[in-house]
Amino acid sequence: MRLGKRQKAKAEIPTCSMADIAFLLIIFFMVTTVFRVEIGLLIELPRATAVQKLPRKNIVHIWINDEEMISIDDMDTPLGSISWPMSQKLMVNPNIIVSMLTDQNASYGVMADVFDELKDAGALKVSLGAKKKKGG
């Protein structure tokens, strides 16, 4: 009598229906997934009715260049000290409108910091400037 090793049956996973199962799982998750709709900021833009020419004494120009240097009415001002000269100008003339022009390569963070300092100074009338179109 010969005792030999039994051959073990190899466990095989049937792969013929695996593509069908994967496809059904993809369809299931596509159907049951709920996408949340992002609601943006509700901003009501002002409507332009008439263009008024403002007196030069009521406008303060702030320029931010691409090197993030700030100048207020052609006077260089460091970022941390904008609120004091602006509060002084507002004490003299409370009807001041700030016109802010920024270079397109300047970082948005600097512009946000300038907005914060203007808010601290009480300058709430801020106008953002844009490039003029060439030729018309």
Image (tube, grey):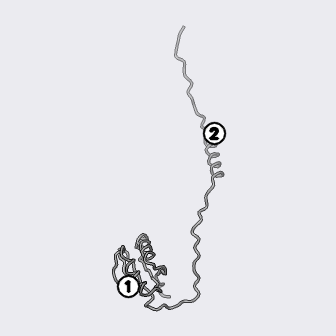
Q: Is 12 placed above or below 7 here?
A: below
From the top left corner, tell me how far across and down residue 48 is, in percent.
57, 85
Q: Residue at x 43, y 80 (%)?
A: 101
**Is residue 133 toward the left or the right of residue 25 in the image?**
left
- Number of other residues with Cα within 10 Å of mark 2, as a class: few under 14, some 14 to 19, many 20 or more: few
From the top left corner, tell me how far across and down residue 125 is, in percent.
49, 81
**Is residue 4 toward the left or the right of residue 31 in the image?**
left
From the top left corner, tell me how far across and down residue 133 is, in percent.
48, 84
Picture quarter with the N terminus? top right
The residue pinned by badge 2 equals 17
Secondary structure category for the residue under label 1:
loop
Q: Residue at x 53, y 11 (%)?
A: 3
Q: Residue at x 42, y 71 (%)?
A: 113
- Comparing 15 with 126, the one in front is 126
From the top left corner, tell me how far across and down residue 16 is, in percent.
62, 38
Amino acid on which disc 1 is placed: Asp
Q: Residue furthest front?
A: 91
Q: What distance separates the C-alpha of mark 1 from that of mark 2?
A: 75 Å
Q: Which badge, 1 or 2, is on the more N-terminal residue? A: 2
Q: Are marks 1 and 2 in contact (CB under 8 Å)?
A: no
Q: Residue at x 55, y 22 (%)?
A: 8
Amino acid on which disc 2 is placed: Ser
- Comparing 65 with 112, the one in front is 112
The residue pinned by badge 1 equals 73
What label sits on residue 129 in the rendered view?
A: none
